[in-house]
Image (cartoon, grey):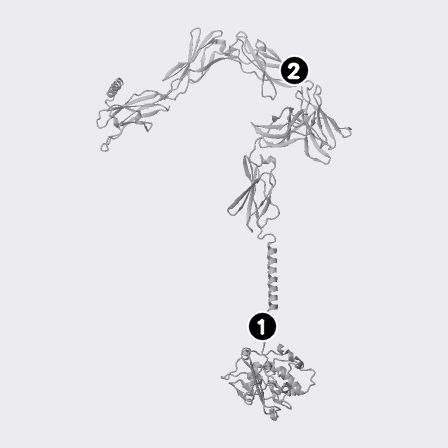
């Protein structure tokens, strides 16, 4: 209640001040700064309005409405809010009013009031680590003191922390300066041997603190210049020491000085300090001892007030450089040899190299090298004995390449020489090839902390003097030696990333080397810088292709190739096959025939991959032997078909003959020939009665119409019964032969004679009862007829009449000569001469009687006219 009353009284005062304002809301308090991290309480009061109450008010901080749980209702017209200040940026806190009901709309410009909050940090801690220094200028001490300290905490731009440096001397003089960081105070003349009190005051709007007070003698704050004119003297009789001299930086009337000295060899990264107790006196020279002869040293000197706890150390002087005098080399040179290339029939070539002795005591100018070869018979041969220096690469000296025969063991001796003397003799032995002692086991090399870690297991033999770890990469070779108990070590030489190193470990037994155990390693792996180009081995097949490629050289693989991925594409379809990194070929299968493929290879390490160039090829349309198989198959099929046709023709020859060469009925074998309308048939007629004296009229079956037209008047024709009567004349007798006649239709039209092969052919024979031209027939008249659907072939012998071949041996298809024909037959023959298709040569031996020739001619010519042969 008391707090509420105080707030209401404050509101009344604010109301009095706000009397002339048109705003209906009033907020308070309005502090100058608000401490970051503190709780802030603000109050909002409604002035002279009854339509709104405290329940309609709300608070907005940086456009964010504060939750109502932070509100406190004082009365019906006042409300407060309490929240924690978290941001150090300035911001507005507004008190706003919402419409009390949908029917009332307020003028929001009159119902808004705010507080502008500026933030600041309280000074949390006093300035710390206060230190002050007065520097030397020329030969006296400057009157300006410079002080530094640690800040007292965070601050804002609106309320920064102001630091004030206070310096007070024994005369009650007070010197101050104000700053935001370090400060300087000018004292005029420096008060030597007087006490000073120094402190710092930190202050802002939210508080103030002071640092500790430094109360020391004025010389306690002095920092002099470093000693000048440093000189170094070397003495030939003392090769392990150097004498330093310098000049005092300030007069002793100010104070006495103490010194510190440090030195190092050229190229080293660390310094060696002289013990402080040896340089605490007021001195101006010092002798450095236990140095290496013939070595270049760099020295520096610093000083300060000799009074304990007073003053600050000066900066280090400039470098003073000097060589120590030389002495004979101490120790042995580090001798080693590496094999060049592969062994051949004559042995192997080795490169001899060395490093200077650890204590070379000067510059090595040359080496004395002696090489001896020992045969099995213990005979010794001196191969080389030279004194030379070929070339240097860093701290390695390359001496000579020498061949070592396989059947000999080799000993190498080396001595280092400088301007004063020579070192002890180093020895290295190479056993006869095939008789080397075993080396280490389970050699492993891995990258660790930017270095290569080499680990191995001791060999079974305990006769070990030391180990040699050799590494070769990018044409450079280096080595280091480890004691006999070592099983793991880091390579100390400089190594490069992405370079393949061949690391080998040798065992030395009294100077004799063993076989090498080697592995390859990378300090750091990267993606390959190239990928192999793929090519075809031979020609692509029907459904496959054999791809080959070459391994990437180690200098461009930049790591161990873990896998090769083979891609092959046709159209939009791309397939991939992954093989191991030691592969150099792969055979693609299940390819489509007569198809063009694009293929490429991607080489991958653990760090990335690289895509190679693309190669195209086209598969074969046919598989090997497929064309030959087709040809052989077709040939065998054709042969089989031909054989089947031949066999079919053989087994079906009778059917084929009946279809292609049909059997033509022989009228001479027909029984109809004995039939007659006037006389009874006779079973057997003597054949001889049919072959005696016959005159034959040759008539072409295709020109039957002409014959009929010419003989219509003299020859009777019976149309409807296909019966024609013909008279044959013979000399001294009658004949049973008849001429063929064409069938005459009722319309008296002669058809095309070419169609007679498909129509009925009548064969008829008439033997008249009266003789031709008054001749007396020897036998009564006989009428015979036979019909056939096919014409007889010219001069064809019927196979069924083979039994009668004996009686027909003398018959030929020859036309009668003119001498044997009657005058009418001869005239008719001349008319039908162009239509004769049975042109047979006349009988050359025409010695038979005319009657026999006529009979023979008629019997062989009648089949062409549709007649029949006599029986």
Residue 312, how many percent across, how many down? 51, 13
**Viewer-closest of 33 and 836:** 836
Q: Secondary structure at mark 1?
A: helix
Gap between marks 2 and 1, in whole Å? Answer: 134 Å
Question: In this rendering, is residue 777 above or below 232?
Answer: below
- Residue 85, quarter of picture: top left
Lower position in the chain sequence, tag 2 or tag 1: 2
Horizontally, residue 551 falls left or right of residue 114, namely right
Say which residue label 1 marks: 660
Residue marked by disc 2? 240
Residue 554 pos. (x, y %): 61, 35
Secondary element at tag 2: strand
Q: Residues within 10 Å of mark 1 (few under 14, many from 20)?
A: few
Q: Nearer the viewer, mark 2 or mark 1?
A: 1
Query: For this view, does 165 lie left or right of residue 559?
Result: left
* Relative horizontal placement of residue 349, taking residue 653 as reference (left or right): right
- Residue at 60 percent of width and 11 percent of height: 285
């Amino acid at each position: 209640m008391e707090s509420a009353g105080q707030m209401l009284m404050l509101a009344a005062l604010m109301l009095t001040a706000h009397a002339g304002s048109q705003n209906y809301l009033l907020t308070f308090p309005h502090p100058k700064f608000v401490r970051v991290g503190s709780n802030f309480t603000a109050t909002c009061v409604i002035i002279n309005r009854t339509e709104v109450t405290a329940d309609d008010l709300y608070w907005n901080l940086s456009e964010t409405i504060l939750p109502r749980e932070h509100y406190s209702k004082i009365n019906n017209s006042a409300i407060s809010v309490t929240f924690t200040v978290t941001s150090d940026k300035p911001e507005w806190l507004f008190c706003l009013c919402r419409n009390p009901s949908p029917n009332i709309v307020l003028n929001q410009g009159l119902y808004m009031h705010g507080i502008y909050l500026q933030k600041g940090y309280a000074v949390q801690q006093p300035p710390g680590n206060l230190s002050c220094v007065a520097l030397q200028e020329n030969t006296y001490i400057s009157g300006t003191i410079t002080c530094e300290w640690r800040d007292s905490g965070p601050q804002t731009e609106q309320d920064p922390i102001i630091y004030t440096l206070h310096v007070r001397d024994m005369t009650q003089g007070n010197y101050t300066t104000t700053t935001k960081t370090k400060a300087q105070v000018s004292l005029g003349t420096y008060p030597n041997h007087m006490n000073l009190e120094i402190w710092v005051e930190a202050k802002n709007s939210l508080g103030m603190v002071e640092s500790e007070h430094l109360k020391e003698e004025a010389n306690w704050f002095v920092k002099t210049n470093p000693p000048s004119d440093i000189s170094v003297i070397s003495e030939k009789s003392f090769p392990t020491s150097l004498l330093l001299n310098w000049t005092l930086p300030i007069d002793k009337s100010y104070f006495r000085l103490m010194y510190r000295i440090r030195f190092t060899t050229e190229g080293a990264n660390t310094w060696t300090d002289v013990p402080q107790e040896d340089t605490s006196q007021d001195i101006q020279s010092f002798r450095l001892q236990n140095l290496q002869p013939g070595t270049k040293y760099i020295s520096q000197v610093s000083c300060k007030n000799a009074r304990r706890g007073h003053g600050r150390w000066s900066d280090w002087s400039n470098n003073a450089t000097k060589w120590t005098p030389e002495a004979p080399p101490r120790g042995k040179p580090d001798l080693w040899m590496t094999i060049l290339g592969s062994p051949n029939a004559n042995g192997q070539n080795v490169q001899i190299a060395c490093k200077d002795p650890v204590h070379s005591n000067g510059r090595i100018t040359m080496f004395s090298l002696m090489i001896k070869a020992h045969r099995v018979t213990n005979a010794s041969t001196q191969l080389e004995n030279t004194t030379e220096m070929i070339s240097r690469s860093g701290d390695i000296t390359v001496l000579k390449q020498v061949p070592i025969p396989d059947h000999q063991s080799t000993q190498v001796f080396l001595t280092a020489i400088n301007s004063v003397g020579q070192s002890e003799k180093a020895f290295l032995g190479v056993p006869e090839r095939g008789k080397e002692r075993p080396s280490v086991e389970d050699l492993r090399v891995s990258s660790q902390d930017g270095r290569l870690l080499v680990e191995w297991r001791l060999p079974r033999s305990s006769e070990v003097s030391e180990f040699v770890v050799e590494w070769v990469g990018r044409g450079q070779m280096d080595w280091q030696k480890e004691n006999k108990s070592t099983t793991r070590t880091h390579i100390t030489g400089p190594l490069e990333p992405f370079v393949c190193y061949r690391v080998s470990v040798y065992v030395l037994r009294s100077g004799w080397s063993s076989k090498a155990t080697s592995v390859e390693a990378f300090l750091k792996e990267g993606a390959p810088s190239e990928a192999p180009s793929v090519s075809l081995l031979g020609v692509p097949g029907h459904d496959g292709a054999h791809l080959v490629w070459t391994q990437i050289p180690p200098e461009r693989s930049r790591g161990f190739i873990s896998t090769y991925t083979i891609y092959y594409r046709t159209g939009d379809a791309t397939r991939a096959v992954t093989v191991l990194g030691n592969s150099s070929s792969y055979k693609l299968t299940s390819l489509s025939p007569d198809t063009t493929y694009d293929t490429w290879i991607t080489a991958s390490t653990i760090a990335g991959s690289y895509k190679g160039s693309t190669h195209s090829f086209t598969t074969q349309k046919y598989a090997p032997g497929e064309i030959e198989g087709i040809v052989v198959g077709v040939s065998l099929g054709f042969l089989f078909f031909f054989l089947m046709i031949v066999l079919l023709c053989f087994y079906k020859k009778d059917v084929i003959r009946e279809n292609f060469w049909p059997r033509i009925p022989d009228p001479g074998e027909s029984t109809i020939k004995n039939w007659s309308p006037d006389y009874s048939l006779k079973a057997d007629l003597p054949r001889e009665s049919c072959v005696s004296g016959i005159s034959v009229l040759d008539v072409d079956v295709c020109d039957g119409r002409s014959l009929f037209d010419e003989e219509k008047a003299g020859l009777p024709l019976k149309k409807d019964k296909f019966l024609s009567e013909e008279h044959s004349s013979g000399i001294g007798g009658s004949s049973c032969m008849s001429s063929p006649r064409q069938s005459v239709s009722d319309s008296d039209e002669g058809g095309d004679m070419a169609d007679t092969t498909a129509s009925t052919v009548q064969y008829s024979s008439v033997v008249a009862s009266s003789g031709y031209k008054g001749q007396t027939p020897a036998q009564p008249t006989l009428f015979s007829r036979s019909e056939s659907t096919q014409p007889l072939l010219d001069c064809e012998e019927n196979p069924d009449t083979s039994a009668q071949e004996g009686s027909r041996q003398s018959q030929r298809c020859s036309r009668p000569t003119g001498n044997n024909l009657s005058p009418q037959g001869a005239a008719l023959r001349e008319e039908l001469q162009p239509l004769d298709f049975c042109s047979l040569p006349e009988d050359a031996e025409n010695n038979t009687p005319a009657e026999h020739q006529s009979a023979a001619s008629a019997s062989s010519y009648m089949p062409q006219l549709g007649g029949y042969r006599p029986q």
